[in-house]
Image (cartoon, helix red, strand yellow):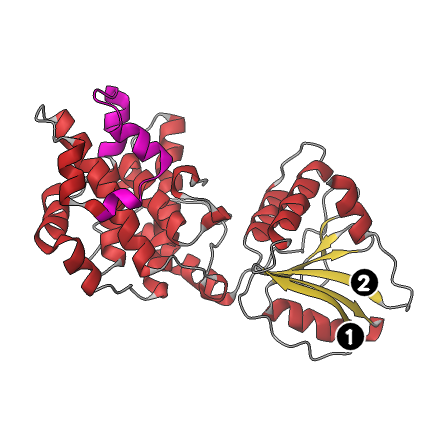
Amino acid sequence: MLNRIKQLFSAKDTSHHILINAYCTVAEVPKPGFPHVLNARRDLSDPELQPHLNGFMNYLAQAGAGQMTQVRYHVIRHVQRVRQHVSLSIEEGAMDGFAAWAEAANAIVFMADGSVRDPQGRVLLPASGDDGDPQAVVPYPPQAWQRKARSDELLAARKIAVPATLPPLVSEPELRLRTPEDVLRRMLALFVVAIRAESLTGGHAIAVEDLKKRFPPAFAGLTDAERAYLAQETPTEHETTQFLWRYEAILVLQWVLGLQDGLPFADAICDVAAISRTVIERGTEGLRKQLAMRPAAEILDALDLHYRQHWATRQAILKKTAAPAALNDGVLQERHHALNWLVHFEDRDWDDVDTPT
């Protein structure tokens, strides 16, 4: 795979044009308004793009000789969000026009010399693996920077300190949200697992067969890990505790579907009774009849804020200090997990969702 990546990007353009591979994170790439030859263009509907991106990320990691610098990490994160790959041949005199296009497309650029550059052509990662131009910046859409600024302001007001170097996250032009039906199915699956865990903890176990009769659609959406848990008559206490925490993720998904008014500050566990009433009183068919999603901007606001709060609690754990503003790391872990799943973070399924900070 590494050799294939090198061959692809070291190909020479015999027309005396500059060969450029642009990796764009936005869903709609603007039409190039400068002289160019389009060599190739593909999006995530092309089955070959995701394996290519995986290979490119592996190439970037190996090129660093095992040194995962902040710039290299953020470049790899950018590639994870890519939705369009565009290969162009451009005359040298058209580079200013290309820079404006690349900025609008939120693209990083791989050049034939093996360097990775920002939209203005500044070197983020040279082929040598050394540090690039200190002025080079991994691009993010304006909405992402604005959202980060709002989150930082809200956290500062609560005296929650997070470093300015924490990056922006996915924003509106890049977003791929789960569908309302997917969110409802996931919420119901989490609910039957959580209610089973709660009943075991309380010493009044609800039989899995009874749950299946009451909430049949929920069982169609179970993950492998959830199915394995429900198959056990006497799961371990650790497993049960893990699935009991899923109520916090259910709260997020109910909020996304408009079934809860808000996400309370993450300094206390959720109202389990209110979450359960929402499902039990409406029933699965009643919930399906009024499916709706909150605006994408609200979901992204929640993701950005919880990501930064989660960083703060993890730092407190590492330093063995109290979490700022009494933040609850367990609550944040579950909320962060649910929000990352909602936005297709790393394009992973539920059991494999990561929550890096």
For mark 2, give the secondary structure.
strand
Answer whether residue 182 is visible to the viewer in this image.
Answer: yes
Tell me which residue sits at (44%, 64%) in the image: 146
User: Left or right of 324: which side holds 274?
Assistant: left
Residue nearest the observer in this picture, 175 or 281: 281
Where is residue 189 drawn, in percent x and y?
26, 43
Tell me which residue sits at (79%, 46%) in the image: 6
**Within-10-Å neighbours for mark 1: few <14, some 14–19, many 20+:** some
The quarter of the image holding the C terminus is top left
Q: Residue 36 got which mark?
A: 1
Tell me which residue sits at (29%, 64%) in the image: 294
Answer whether residue 259 is visible to the viewer in this image.
Answer: no
Q: Quadrant of residue 128?
A: top right
Q: Quadrant of residue 207?
A: top left
- Amino acid type of disc 1? His
User: Main structural element of the magenta stretch: helix, strand or loop?
Assistant: helix
- Amino acid type of disc 2? Leu
Q: What's the magenta region?
A: 217-244
Q: Is residue 2 above or below residue 38?
A: above
